[in-house]
Image: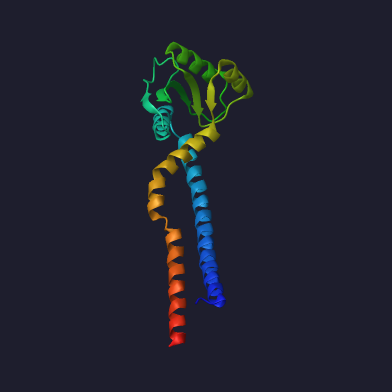
Amino acid sequence: MIHIIDLIILALLFKFFWGIWKRKEYKKNTAQLKKSEKDMESELIKIDNMDERDFEHYCADLLQKNGFTNVSVTDSSGNNGVNIFATKHNLNYAFQCVRQQSKLCNRAVQQIYEGSEYYKCDKAVVLTNNFFTHSAIDRAIQLDVVIWGRDLLTRLIEASQNSTTKTSQKSSTPNIAGTILFLCICGFIAIGVRMFVSTV
C-alpha cells in the first residue's frame, strides 16, 4: 500500500523536475528572442542597401513563402507600375515594390492603382521597406489600395522564417510529457522497491 509520504515525495520530485524544465525553457526562449531581434535588424539593414531590382525579387520570394502562388516579377520597364503579379485565395494581386530611404508619397499609390486597373487585378498593393506619408495613406484609402510598410514587411519576414524552421523545431523539441511520465514511473518503481524491501 502506498503511504501518503510516498505520494508527497513523488509530488515534490515532479515539481522539482518541472521547475528545472521551465527555467531551462525560459532561458532558451529569451536567448532565441534576442537572436531573432538581432537577425531581423541585420535583415532590414541588408534590405535597405538593396537596389530596386534585387528588392523586387526579394519581395517575390517573400510572397511565395507567405502562401502566394503564381508569383512573377515583371520586366523593369513597360510594366505600368506593377513589379509583381501574384495570386492568393483566388484573388489576383498587383504589387509595386519600392525600396527607398524616405517615406513614400502619393506617386506609388497612384501608379499601382492605375497598373492594377490596366491589368484588371483584384487587389493593388504597395510594398516598401519604409513608411508612408499621411497624404499617401489618405490616397490609398480613397483608391482602395493596400499599403504594406516596414512593419508589415517585418511580419512577412518573420512568418517566412517561422514556416521554414517549424519542422526542425518540432524534431528538436523534447517530448516533455514523455519525460514527465518516465520520471513518474521511475518514482513509482522506487516506491515499490522500497515497500518490498521493507516487508522482507
Which residue is depicted at the point 43% across and 88% down?
A: 200
Which residue is depicted at the point 49% across and 18% down?
A: 112
The image shows residue 17, relative to residue 42, as above or below, that is: below
Q: Can you give x and y, in whole percent of width and height, for residue 125 in the image?
A: 49, 23
The image shows residue 176, relative to residue 191, as above or below, that is: above
Query: Is residue 9 or residue 138 the one in the foreground?
Result: 9
Which quadrant of the structure image shows residue 12? bottom right
Q: Answer left or right for 119 relative to 18.
A: left
Q: Can you give x and y, in whole percent of width and height, for residue 73 in the image?
A: 37, 24
Q: Can you give x and y, in whole percent of width and height, for residue 26 in the image?
A: 54, 58
In the picture as drawn, the residue positioned furthest to the bottom comes out as 200
Q: Can you give x and y, in whole percent of width and height, for residue 16 in the image?
A: 54, 69
Which residue is depicted at the point 46% across and 15% down?
A: 116
Which residue is depicted at the point 40% across and 27% down?
A: 53
Q: How is the image coloured?
A: rainbow
In the picture as drawn, the residue positioned furthest to the top comes out as 118
Query: Is residue 99 or residue 181 the one in the foreground?
Result: 181
Query: Is residue 179 or residue 93 the one in the foreground?
Result: 179
